[in-house]
Amino acid sequence: MQFIDLQQQYRRYQTEIDASIRRVLEHGQYIMGPEIGELEAALARYVGVNHAIAVASGTDSLEIALRALDIGPGHEVITVPFTWISSAEVIGLVGAKPVFVDIRAEDYNLDPDLLEAAITPRTKAILPVSLFGQMPDYDRINAIAARHGIAVIEDAAQSFGATQRGRRSCSVTSIGSTSFFPAKPLGCFGDGGALFSSDDRLAEKMRAIRSHGGLKRHHHPYLGMNGRLDTLQAAILLAKLPHFPGETEARGRIGARYTSLLADICTVPTVSPGNTHVYAQYTIRVPNRDQLGEALKKQGIPTAVYYPKCVHEQPVFQPLGYRLGSFPVSEAASRQVISLPMHPFLTEPEQDRVIAAVRGALGSTLS
Ligand SMILES: Cc1ncc(COP(=O)(O)O)c(C=O)c1O
């Protein structure tokens, strides 16, 4: 059994993917070829915003967003400590200070009740993460941000395809940022990402920063980077995109089935009111996850831990002065979470095998 079955996905869409790759090989425009514009138009339509900008990774996209907002030394950006390192790394990379706010145990996302207390005159943006595949409460987060005149950047690396009150992830904040890392809900065959905005000026600036800070050849108004998506990756995404709504629906169904068959024996994910969940990870919480992981491994069932350590515990962020106990909800989650196999092609018999193994392990060794 695979944790995420990318080979099967390729086999299913092989004809379209191969044809799309071949088109690029034939026209030879490997950098900023026509597929980039086609993909950006399709992504903007899907998300429901005016602009999508294809970039080299989900990390570059967050950095470009911060640069476009002129965030740098002397500024603070609020994010969560229970996330992949990129969310905080990019804040440091532009010279600003990451300020962490704890999560809610219910959805592993930024706790809006704790947000206002972390805002200072130096706060320039809030960078909430839509962790595991569902969005935090953006109505509340956006209202607080608006009161203080600060921007909100959604780190939607794990939630592409999710919705909140009918609006898609990446469409509800000043800037949305996602990742097309292969294991993400919409993945390419290498690194990739995208930025989303309906603000024409911001979108144009992000487009420029992606390409060495300029839109005209040999004219560089901004400090930029080489943050372009490869044409080949755009071609792969264009071939996969028509299948994505069906995959998203399957993820939701498979996640809900796990939940209904595991809810009585462990802490299962809850879907917040108004949300749909794309289960980039199907993450449960148990008191002894290492034992559970070992028991499943013995039966050939892979698991993964996202994330065994919070970002504020990482050596690189020690100078910020946080310590163990600073973010109790995040720290407790990081010690107990474990993710089960999840992909759109997981069959019911496979899923039953995972469920039986989890139930067996929790009922015997862990009781
Ligand atoms: C929450 C989060 N933010 C940012 C990223 C960065 O994306 P990428 O790996 O494409 O740079 C990831 C990817 O793992 C992520 O999970």
Image (tube, rainbow, N blue to C red):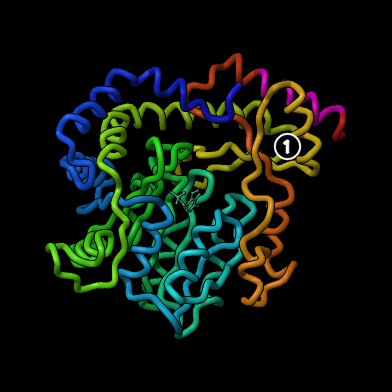
Residue 140 covered by magenta stretch: no
Residue at disc 1, secondary structure: loop
Q: Which residues are magenta?
A: 353-364
Vertical side of 196 occupied by 293: above or below: above
- The residue under the point 59% across, 52% down is 108
Question: What residue is disc 1 on?
Answer: 266
Return the x and y of residue 145 as percentages of the image width and height.
41, 71
- The residue under the point 67% across, 73% down is 322
- The residue nearer to you, when weighing 194 against 56, is 56
Return the x and y of residue 158 as percentages of the image width and height.
47, 45
Vertical side of 302 occupied by 85: above or below: below
Q: Quadrant of residue 234?
A: top left
Return the x and y of residue 251 as percentages of the image width and height.
48, 30
How would you classify the magenta stretch by its main secondary structure?
helix
Vertical side of 88 occupied by 135: above or below: above
Q: Is residue 45 visible?
A: no
Residue 182 located left or right of residue 260 = left
Vertical side of 163 occupied by 5: above or below: above
The C terminus sits in image quarter: top right
- The residue under the point 60% across, 17% down is 350
Residue type for callout 1: Cys
Return the x and y of residue 297 as percentages of the image width and height.
73, 28
In this view, the residue farthest toward the top is 349
The N terminus sits in image quarter: top right
In this view, the residue farthest toward the left is 216
Q: Quadrant of residue 26?
A: top left
Residue 300 located left or right of residue 163 = right
Q: Is residue 298 visible?
A: yes
Label 1 packing within 10 angstroms: few (<14), some (14-19), many (20+): some
- The residue nearer to you, when weighing 100 against 134, is 100
- The residue under the point 47% across, 72% down is 77
